[in-house]
Image: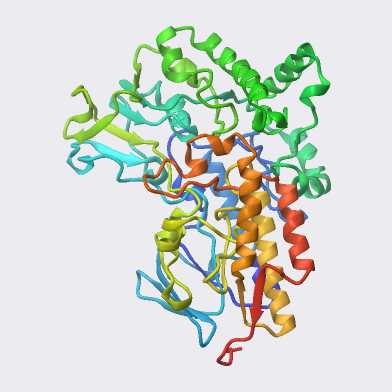
């Protein structure tokens, strides 16, 4: 919105939430926090804006992140152009005028030339997952819709479903306050320990003094983080490789995943050796064979880094508490939610007062698919994505002129990407594209069929060369029954993606068709 204003355009946002914050508005569950370093999870288009906020620690929690986003919104005076508590329900493209009619659940009707979907990669929670949820006598919540006022968990019997990144943050946070915690675990996760030092004036001076360095560096690394892959597996001896892994593991960040050895994503032998290194670290902390069987991935199951890697603080140790129980639901799945708690396939019932569902999202395509979006000839976006998840650059979709997207499928987003780095690049590209259209007298832009085919082909060739494509997770949409399988995020690297997008713009948008509308445009 800020960038469009800079072009002299009018921009208006609709947000279902009651305030700014996006994912950090909705995800306010216990323990929610960054696992990107705070000083890189930043907007780098304005030095004063960057330096005007001071973080309290390396990986701050949700309340501080939400305050930071309020600071951003207020510094840029964004609230005046946002309709809060307003949900877009429908958007229809008019081929004659080249404009969109946008409707909200609050009765608003908006006529606009461009629609930009900033709906997020992980913002369509899978809330209705189990039969009988409405019968439960206690409180049942999805982590992505955790109540603003929180829940009183003290002295309660609490069940957490899911041990992905979100479930891990919840488990390690509430274990000490509940009467009894039952964790229902299906897929074991590789985890890395988080080191989260507090920041004082010296640390603030350190990272604020790096503004130019970070602005230059972040957009061109593989993942949009400050670190990048520097080591070559074949160049090192086994002893040297182990030393590198030990050093990076001790960093207490995502660096082992995002900047150790790139070969782990392509070479099964390298993947297995690094995976075993992480499993070894986890087993040493758990010690209990039963817990190891439930919580630590097995050799050959899937490789470290091919699923989302969580950072944690004493997560594994939480299961060593007397009041915490791990229940495997891999071979004995959850059958239903009943009035008194949760029932497994074998008939076992776990009586609970509160159920917290850390069961994930319909990633990438989910949020826009929940809006009734109709393009040319009444083409429905949700129906198209039910057949095959395709985009051009992850920024537009064939058949939907003047509809731009951020954080959408086939762009770097959520997976292998520092989100602020990637979102800033995508919004800048969109703004520059609109500026180009105004300068060239064009009203409508849409990918060509051939242009979209070429991007999908490149995306798939890149993704299918990785081990990520061979695994099942939300990265490939396999957590949603019936969803077409495709690696949802671009895996060629943040810097490579930026270069390709920039080249397409320089060459006059060859993957797209630009034209004038049949009917005159309003000023």
Mark yes or no: residue 17 visible: no
Could you say where residue 141 lies in the image, as x and y percent from the top left? 32, 41
User: Residue at position x 74%, y 49% from top?
Assistant: 496
Q: Quadrant of residue 390 in the image?
A: bottom right
Nearer to me, 458 or 25: 458
Task: Please give the name of the residue rendered at 41% of the width and 56% of the height, measured from the top-left corner.
Answer: 386
- In the image, residue 343 lies at what x, y percent? 22, 28
Pinpoint residue 344: horizontal percent, then vertical percent: 24, 26
Left of 310 or right of it: where is 51? right
The relative height of residue 305 versus residue 129 in the rendered view (above or below) is: above
Q: Quadrant of the N terminus?
A: bottom right
Q: Quadrant of residue 209?
A: top right
Task: Look at 73% across and 75% down and name the residue there.
Answer: 436
Quick check: 505 left or right of 34?
A: right
Q: Residue 264: image x %, image y %?
A: 67, 28
Position of residue 87 in the picture relative to residue 311 (left or right): left
* Rendered view: 3 above or below 17: below
Q: Residue 119: in sight, yes or no?
A: yes
């Amino acid at each position: 919105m800020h960038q469009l204003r800079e072009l002299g355009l009018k921009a208006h946002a609709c947000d279902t939430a009651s305030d700014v914050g996006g994912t950090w508005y909705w995800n306010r569950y216990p323990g929610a926090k960054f696992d990107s370093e705070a000083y890189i999870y930043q907007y780098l288009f304005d030095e004063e804006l960057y330096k005007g906020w001071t973080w309290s620690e390396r990986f701050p929690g949700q309340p501080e992140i939400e305050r930071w986003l309020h600071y951003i919104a207020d510094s840029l005076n964004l609230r005046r152009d946002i309709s809060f508590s307003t949900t877009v329900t429908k958007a229809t493209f008019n081929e004659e005028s080249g404009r969109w009619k946008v409707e909200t659940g609050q009765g608003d009707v908006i006529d606009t030339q461009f629609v930009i979907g900033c709906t997020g990669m992980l913002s369509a929670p899978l809330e209705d997952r189990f039969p009988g949820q409405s019968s439960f006598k206690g409180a049942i919540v999805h982590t992505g819709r955790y109540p603003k006022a929180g829940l009183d968990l003290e002295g309660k019997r609490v069940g957490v479903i899911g041990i992905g990144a979100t479930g891990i943050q919840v488990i390690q946070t509430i274990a000490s306050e509940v009467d009894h915690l039952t964790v229902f675990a299906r897929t074991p996760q590789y985890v890395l320990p988080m080191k989260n030092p507090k920041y004082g004036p010296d640390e603030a001076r350190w990272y604020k003094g790096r503004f130019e360095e970070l602005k230059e560096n972040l957009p061109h690394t593989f993942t949009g983080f400050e670190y990048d892959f520097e080591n070559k597996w074949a160049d090192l001896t086994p002893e040297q490789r182990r030393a590198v892994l030990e050093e990076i593991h001790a960093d207490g960040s995502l660096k082992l995943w995002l900047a150790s050895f790139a070969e782990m994503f392509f070479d099964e032998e390298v993947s297995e050796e690094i995976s075993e290194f992480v499993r070894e670290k986890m087993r040493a902390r758990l010690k209990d064979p039963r817990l190891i069987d439930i919580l630590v991935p097995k050799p050959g199951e899937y490789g470290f880094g091919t699923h989302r890697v969580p950072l944690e603080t004493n997560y594994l140790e939480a299961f060593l508490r007397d009041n915490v129980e791990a229940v495997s639901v891999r071979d004995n799945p959850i059958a239903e939610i009943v009035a008194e708690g949760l029932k497994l396939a074998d008939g076992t019932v776990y009586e609970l007062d509160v159920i917290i569902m850390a069961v994930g999202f319909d990633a990438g395509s989910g949020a826009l698919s929940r809006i009734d979006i109709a393009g040319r000839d009444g083409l429905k976006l949700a129906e198209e994505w039910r057949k095959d998840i395709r985009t051009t650059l992850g920024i537009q979709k064939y058949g939907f002129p003047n509809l731009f997207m951020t954080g959408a499928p086939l762009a770097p987003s959520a997976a292998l990407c520092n989100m602020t780095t990637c979102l800033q690049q995508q919004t800048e590209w969109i703004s520059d594209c609109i500026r180009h259209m105004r300068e060239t007298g064009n009203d409508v832009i849409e990918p060509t069929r051939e242009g979209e085919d070429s991007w999908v082909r490149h995306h798939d060739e890149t993704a299918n060369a990785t081990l990520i494509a061979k695994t099942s997770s939300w990265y490939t949409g396999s957590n949603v029954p019936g969803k077409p399988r495709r690696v949802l995020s671009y895996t060629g690297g943040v810097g490579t993606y930026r270069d390709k997008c920039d080249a397409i713009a320089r060459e006059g948008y060859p993957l797209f068709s630009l034209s004038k509308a049949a009917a005159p445009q309003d000023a």
